[in-house]
């Protein structure tokens, strides 16, 4: 039985691993596990960020993160863990300089936004649990939270 619970710090390592596995070909996983975990540490429990975890017998199998305001999402994480994020990002860019274009696009993304400021930031479900409605459940819970926050 899948249970959806609010994202808590204790699930961050698990959701980082889910992100790395389920979205391995995306940009953020290319920055490495430490970068991703640090990014999530910077946004968990923030007023403008909503996260939910899908659990199967207390094991995280999926997650969704949304924000009231995308500009605040990135700046919140950067402010919270600026030096750690900069360190991990620098290491990765030294290994693969071609990622700089993606870094600029990702961190300037919110400045191009003209639609609603609330946005689903990331959703991922372990492959074994895909096509079972878990992603839909996560999106439904996030949408309900967005509506309750107007």
Image: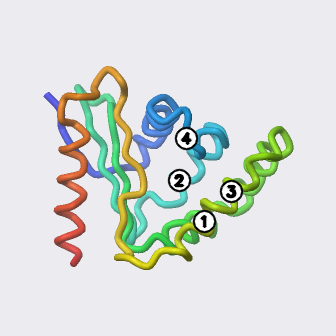
Q: Tally the marks.
A: 4
Crowd band around label 3 with a 10 angstrom C-alpha radius: few (<14), some (14–19), many (20+) = some
Gap in Å between the C-alphas at discs 1 and 4?
A: 24 Å
The residue to which callout 4 is attached is 26
* Vertical placement of residue 91 versus 129, above or below: below
Which of the labelled discs sits on residue 41, or is there none?
Answer: 2
Assign a secondary structure to mark 3.
helix
Residue underneath mark 1: 80
Q: How is the image coloured?
A: rainbow
**Sequence-wise, which precedes: disc 3 or disc 1?**
1
Q: Quadrant of the N terminus?
A: top left
Q: Is residue 103 left or right of residue 55?
A: right
Left or right of residue 139, residue 109 in this image: right
In front: label 4 or label 2: 4
Contact? badges 2 and 1 (CB < 8 Å): yes
State which tag comes first along the sequence, 4 or 2. Answer: 4
Element class at badge 2: helix
Identify the mark nearer the N-term, 4 or 3.
4
Q: Residues within 10 Å of mark 1 (few under 14, many from 20)?
A: some
Vertical arrangement, residue 120 with respect to residue 136, above or below:
below
Q: Secondary structure at mark 4?
A: loop
Towards the viewer: 105 or 135: 105
> First in sequence: mark 1 or mark 4?
4
Q: Position of residue 77 (x, y in %)?
A: 57, 63
Residue at numbered disc 3: 103
């Amino acid at each position: 039985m899948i249970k959806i619970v609010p994202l808590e710090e204790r699930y961050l390592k698990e959701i980082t691993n889910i992100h790395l596995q389920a979205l391995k070909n995306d940009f953020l996983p290319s920055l490495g596990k430490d970068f991703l975990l640090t990014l999530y540490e910077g946004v968990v429990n923030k007023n403008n960020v909503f996260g939910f975890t899908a659990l199967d017998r207390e094991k995280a199998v999926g997650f969704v993160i949304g924000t009231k305001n995308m500009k605040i999402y990135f700046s919140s994480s950067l402010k919270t863990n600026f030096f750690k994020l900069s360190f991990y990002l620098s290491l990765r860019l030294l290994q693969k300089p071609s990622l700089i274009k993606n870094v600029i696009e990702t961190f300037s993304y919110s400045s191009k936004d003209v639609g609603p400021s609330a946005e689903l930031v990331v959703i991922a479900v372990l492959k074994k649990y895909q096509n079972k409605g878990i992603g839909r459940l996560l999106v439904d819970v996030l949408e309900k939270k967005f509506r309750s926050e107007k």
